[in-house]
Image (cartoon, rainbow, N blue to C red):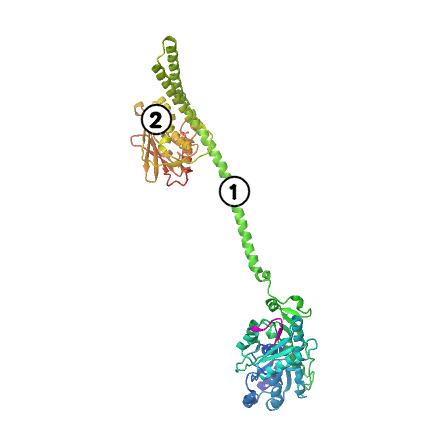
């Protein structure tokens, strides 16, 4: 007992759903039909107090011969709905009208019938107990648009298929054209042509003289079937004249425009009227809604493709499918590219700024290093000054005594030319010697920019020796030089390299201060190395304690009472600037050796100017 009560109460709570059959004349997946069914279902569902059960049946009468199939279709539906009480049947388009008029009582005895999407010219055939919504294919205003767009055109081609419905739509267009008052059209109906034939013909049309209306093409004369919207793209591509029509599903496929109906609105209105009937707000019999007005719509992309100026398009025409502007189309890309470019520009600017800062700092450092090197040279020259003064003094003294001798000869006896010539030759030699020493000293002290040239290191060593020899003599040190003629040329600054040798040699001489006189030997060696030249300066001095070896080349490291600690650090800077290396080692038997390696001109990263 309890169970039964419970069941009843559920049935009452849930209520009965509305059961609605949708009967489209065409294939329900054809976009024109699908749009209407979707709009209809959602409008009806929204108004229903409960669920709505929808059933859809189609014979696709526009593409199949309905007279053959109708008996079987009828039997199927009878069986299908035998035990299904249907509240409402919504028939879409002509086939549904004919079929329901004849058979609705057999299949759905208690259902109300609503017919929609029926051309207004067929309203008279609708039984009085049916509800209906008619529409109007506005061929007239579609032709009016053609007249506005193509003021010169006098020929009107109507493109259609050859199914019954195609004949009907073609006739609508033809009648509208013939009854135009504003222009006398020369009408041509091309019905049932295959796509190829159509394309061939459309391609030859004079675009200014001919307007083309495409109505529908469900079937061509060879029996091929289509959804009419599929035909638009191929014919629009072939045609140089704009294609007019009134179906919204043709827009975006290549249709130029026309007075267009709305499937969406039509479906929604049908759903609304159906709900009113089912809710009992209006009696089914004769229930209807006023016919919708079509809207003039033009496809902007097609207008552009056909070079139709905007000025020809009537003001009340809505323009759709405007090609996206480049900015709209690529805004995202443009903005992100711009952002990346801006970021890159910022990074590059920052790098350039840093680079410039570093270059300025480097230039300043180079200037300071040059100044320092010169100061060090002045200091070395200072160290050598006593011996240099002696070196210059010696030839000057010799010149003086030669001048005296010449004076005496001239005073006291008849001068003998060969004797005087000898005296003059000695004077010249001594003067040259003195001036060479002065010249080398001037070179060394000159403030001049660093200049890299290809040079023979042996020659540079020999020039330096002229400055060193007097000092060595003064300190009772022997100098031995072994310069290999096989040394390759190098690229470098002559004065800077002289300074390296000078610094190493003065250090060597300093180190031998306490060495036995007989042992004091400074050797300067050059020899080719497979990639460059090796210059070695050795002495028999006190040597280098292991503990200080790693600090030798540090700036300001010195073990001397009056040392500056710059000689070796400057030497290393100069050598490294030349792409070379410098190292020290102890010698067997006491003393040190400093080895400088410089790359050959062929391997140098500097290119000597030619
Ligand atoms: P400074 O000569 O003014 O001291 P350097 O940079 O030329 O500066 O030399 C640094 C130190 O390296 C010297 O004080 C000395 O202790 C050591 N040194 C340089 N050359 C030699 C050498 N040939 N033998 C021994 N010690 C040396």
Question: Dots 2 and 1: beta carbons under 8 Å?
Answer: no
Residue on which the image places disc 2:
512
Residue corresponding to mark 1: 356
State yes or no: residue 595 in magenta: no
Residue 195's image quarter? bottom right
- Choose mark 2 or mark 1, whichever is in front: 1
The residues bearing labels 2 and 1 have C-alpha atoms spaced at a distance of 48 Å
Of all residues, the one furthest to the left in this rendering is 589
- Would you call the spot at circle 2 few (<14 residues within 10 Å), some (14-19), or many (20 or more)? many
User: Image quadrant of residue 402?
Assistant: top left
Q: Quadrant of residue 315?
A: bottom right
Measuring from the top left, give residue 110's x and y in whole percent. Answer: 63, 89
SS at mark 1 in the image? helix
- The one nearer the camera, 115 or 391, is 391
Ligand 1, image quadrant it occupies: top left
Q: Is residue 212 magenta?
A: yes
Disc 1: CA contacts within 10 A as few (<14), some (14-19) or many (>=20): few
In depth, the one of 425 and 404 nearer the eye is 425
The range drawn in magenta is 203-213
Q: Would you say residue 230 is visible in this rendering? A: no
Residue 12 image offset from top left, x and y in percent: 62, 83
Earlier in the chain: of badge 2 and badge 1, it is 1
The answer to whether 151 is drawn above or below residue 590 in the figure is below
Question: Residue 419's x, y, as percent?
Answer: 34, 14
The quadrant in which the C terminus is found is: top left
Secondary structure under the numbered disc 2 in the rendered image: loop
């Amino acid at each position: 007992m309890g169970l039964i009560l419970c069941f009843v109460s559920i049935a009452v709570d849930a209520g009965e759903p509305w059961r609605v059959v949708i009967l489209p004349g065409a294939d329900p997946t054809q976009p024109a039909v699908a749009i209407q069914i979707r709009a209809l279902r959602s409008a009806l569902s929204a108004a229903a107090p409960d669920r709505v059960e929808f059933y859809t049946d189609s014979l696709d009468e526009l593409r199949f011969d309905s007279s053959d199939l109708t008996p079987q279709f009828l039997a199927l539906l009878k069986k299908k709905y035998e035990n299904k009480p249907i509240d409402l049947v919504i028939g879409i388009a002509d086939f549904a009208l004919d079929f329901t008029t004849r058979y609705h009582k057999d299949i759905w005895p208690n259902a109300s019938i609503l017919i929609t999407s029926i051309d207004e010219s067929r309203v008279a055939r609708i039984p009085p107990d049916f509800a209906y919504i008619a529409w109007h294919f506005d061929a007239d205003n579609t032709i009016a648009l053609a007249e506005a767009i193509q003021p010169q055109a006098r020929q009107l081609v109507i493109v259609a298929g050859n199914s019954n419905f195609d004949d009907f739509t073609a006739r609508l267009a033809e009648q509208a054209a013939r009854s135009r008052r504003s222009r006398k059209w020369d009408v041509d109906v091309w019905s049932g042509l295959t796509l190829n034939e159509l394309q061939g013909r459309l391609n030859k049309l004079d675009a200014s003289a001919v307007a083309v209306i495409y109505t529908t093409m469900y079937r061509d004369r060879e029996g091929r079937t289509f959804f009419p919207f599929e035909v638009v793209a191929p014919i629009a591509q072939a045609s140089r004249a704009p294609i007019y029509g009134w179906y919204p599903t043709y827009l975006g496929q290549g249709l130029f425009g026309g007075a267009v109906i709305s499937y969406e609105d039509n479906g929604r209105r049908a759903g609304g009227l159906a709900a009113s009937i089912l809710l009992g707000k209006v009696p089914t019999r004769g229930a209807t809604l006023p016919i919708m007005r079509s809207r003039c719509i033009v496809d902007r992309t097609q207008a552009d493709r056909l070079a139709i100026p905007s000025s020809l398009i009537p003001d009340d025409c809505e323009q759709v499918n405007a090609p996206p502007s480049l900015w709209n189309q690529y805004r995202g890309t443009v903005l992100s590219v711009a952002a990346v470019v801006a970021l890159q520009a910022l990074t590059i600017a920052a790098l350039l700024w840093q680079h410039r800062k570093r270059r300025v700092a480097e230039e300043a450092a180079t200037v300071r290093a040059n100044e320092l090197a010169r100061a060090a040279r002045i200091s070395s020259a200072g160290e050598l000054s006593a011996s240099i003064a002696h070196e210059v003094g010696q030839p000057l003294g010799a010149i003086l005594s030669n001048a005296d001798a010449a004076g005496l000869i001239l005073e006291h006896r008849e001068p003998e030319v060969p004797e005087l010539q000898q005296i003059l030759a000695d004077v010249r030699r001594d003067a040259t010697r003195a001036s060479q020493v002065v010249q080398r000293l001037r070179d060394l002290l000159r403030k001049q920019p660093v200049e890299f040239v290809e040079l023979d290191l042996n020659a540079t060593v020999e020039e330096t020796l002229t400055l060193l020899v007097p000092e060595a003599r003064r300190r009772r040190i022997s100098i031995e030089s072994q310069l290999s003629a096989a040394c390759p040329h190098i690229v470098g600054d002559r004065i800077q390299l002289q300074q390296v040798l000078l610094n190493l040699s003065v250090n060597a001489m300093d180190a031998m201060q306490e060495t036995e006189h007989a042992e004091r030997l400074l050797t300067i060696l050059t020899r080719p190395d497979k990639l460059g030249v090796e210059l070695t300066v050795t002495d028999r001095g006190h040597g280098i304690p292991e503990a200080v070896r790693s600090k030798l080349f540090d700036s300001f490291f010195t073990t001397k009472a009056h040392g500056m600690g710059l000689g070796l650090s400057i030497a290393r800077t100069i050598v490294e600037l030349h792409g070379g290396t410098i190292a020290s080692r102890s010698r067997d038997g006491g003393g040190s050796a400093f080895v400088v390696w410089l790359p050959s001109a062929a391997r140098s990263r500097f290119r000597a100017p030619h």
